[in-house]
Image (cartoon, rainbow, N blue to C red):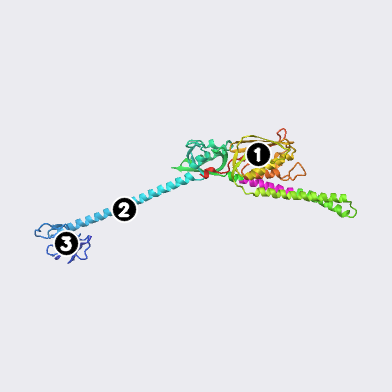
Amino acid sequence: MEVYWLGGSPPDLPGIKQTGTLDGIPEDGFVFIEDTSGIEWKSIHSRRVYLVSDLPVPAPLPAQVVGVIPRDAGAIDAIVTLCTEMVESYDLGDRLIGSLNEKELAVHGTQKALLRDGKRYRAIIRNATDLIFTLDPAGKITFSNETMKRYLGDGRESLIGSALTDFVVDGDRRPVAEMIGKGFQKGVPSKIEARLHLAKGDTGIFSLMSTPLREDGHIYALSVIGRDITDIRSMQHRLSLQAKDLTLMINGLSHELRNPLTVIGAYMRRIEKKEKGMHADSFASALSGIYSSIRRIEEMIERTERYEAIANMKVEYREVNIRRLVMEMIESLPGHIDAAIEGDLEVAAFSDERHIRDAFQRIVENAIETGSERIEIRLEHRDGYAYVSIRDYGPGIEGDAETLFAPFYSTDPVKVGLGLAEARIAMAKIGSSIEVVPQACPGAIFILKILLDRRNVFRSE
């Protein structure tokens, strides 16, 4: 704080500046004015002023004049010291208040950021497409996001307190228990795959990744993220089938082509040797054999291309009325085939109609080729699947039923044998499969197991 003296000679005190005018003195300056200075009161403005006088001063004094003091160096020094300390105290208080305000603003800002981030994190966890939950040492759920409740809840208000193993398929409970034990006992992250019973009635395959949560050196919970890999495993199965079929087809083609080419070669040699003296009937027979062999080669190429077309056909999911589709197929059967249908009146699946139709048609064609004049079809649905059972009354299947689906396998040497391979790959592409009862006494039963809904409805909500 600067101190000014306006008037005669100031007392011999440090820090006091003598001036002859108020001009240049800051508004917050501290001024001693002698009574002989002749300064007008109105020019003082807001400055803090002490009037220095040894004579009585008439009242009233202007508000800017803090007080009247005698011309005494000790009194003036005491007032300067007191005012300086007061100003410093005020400045320190202002700085403290400013600091506190800044800290309060910083705290409020941090709280707002934490609240904002907390809301974001909760929203991310709540709406995540993965299952996010925590487990206690007993394997019971202590927290779960909304996605998990929609996947597994089955109408429950909460999953808290439920044992995770209650939702796990029996055959996968052991690895789940080992994951929980490893997390709490060894304190290490782990990753497994497990099948879970879903609320919509079917089974999903999930990759479960667990991480121990520690506090004060103690593991109090496991944090688990579950990712739905059902479609990935279905794709891997389909690609595995295609790779296997491709290998068999390559091997089969080399074998199957050899026979007609050998026949063609034999007939061509006969024609070359006996061309001049060859009877018309023999010549026609040779040509017939050649044409027949060429036709078989063409048929193998056509069926191979048809298999490739089914394997590469785009999957387009929409609602399919299974019963209507089956009825249309029955109506297209040859007139000598007696067909009957029984079971559920209405079965609908969200799937691809062309793939189901192709698989159904190949199975029926196979039944007709066995010589069966009657086909029985039964419709039912359970556990998230529609089952279309197609029974023929042929001779049944001998040996390994899996061999039936191998490319170029046929009990009829005239047939190419790709129909059942086409049916299997068509079903695999829509997450479905074919089951076989080889000896139904009489005949055989092929069962199309069609997944009712390929959509992950929880992810679209």
Mark 3 residue crowding within 10 angstroms, few (<14) / some (14–19) / many (20+):
few
Question: Of marks 1 and 3, which one's residue comes earlier in the chain?
Answer: 3
363 is higher (above) or lower (below) than 93 = above
Mark 1 residue crowding within 10 angstroms, few (<14) / some (14–19) / many (20+):
some
The residue indicated by pointer 2 is 99
The residue indicated by pointer 3 is 42
* SS label for mark 3: helix
Q: x%, y% of residue 270? A: 86, 52
- Note whether residue 266 is visible: no
Magenta stretch, main secondary structure, is: helix
Type of the residue with mark 1: Met
Which disc is residue 327 wearing? 1
Q: Are marks 2 and 3 in contact (CB under 8 Å)?
A: no
> Considering depth in this image, is 60 or 182 the residue closer to the camera?
60
Mark 2 → mark 1, Cα distance in angstroms: 83 Å
Q: Is residue 6 left or right of residue 256?
A: left
Q: x%, y% of residue 324? A: 63, 40
**240 within the magenta span:** yes
Q: Residue at x 19, y 61 (%)?
A: 45
Mark 1 → mark 3, Cα distance in angstroms: 110 Å
In the image, the segment drawn in magenta is 235-252
Report how many numbered discs are placed on residues in the image: 3
Q: Is residue 214 left or right of residue 373?
A: left
Residue furthest out toward the top: 441
Mark 2 → mark 3, Cα distance in angstroms: 37 Å
Q: x%, y% of residue 86? A: 22, 55
Type of the residue with mark 2: Ser
Type of the residue with mark 3: Lys
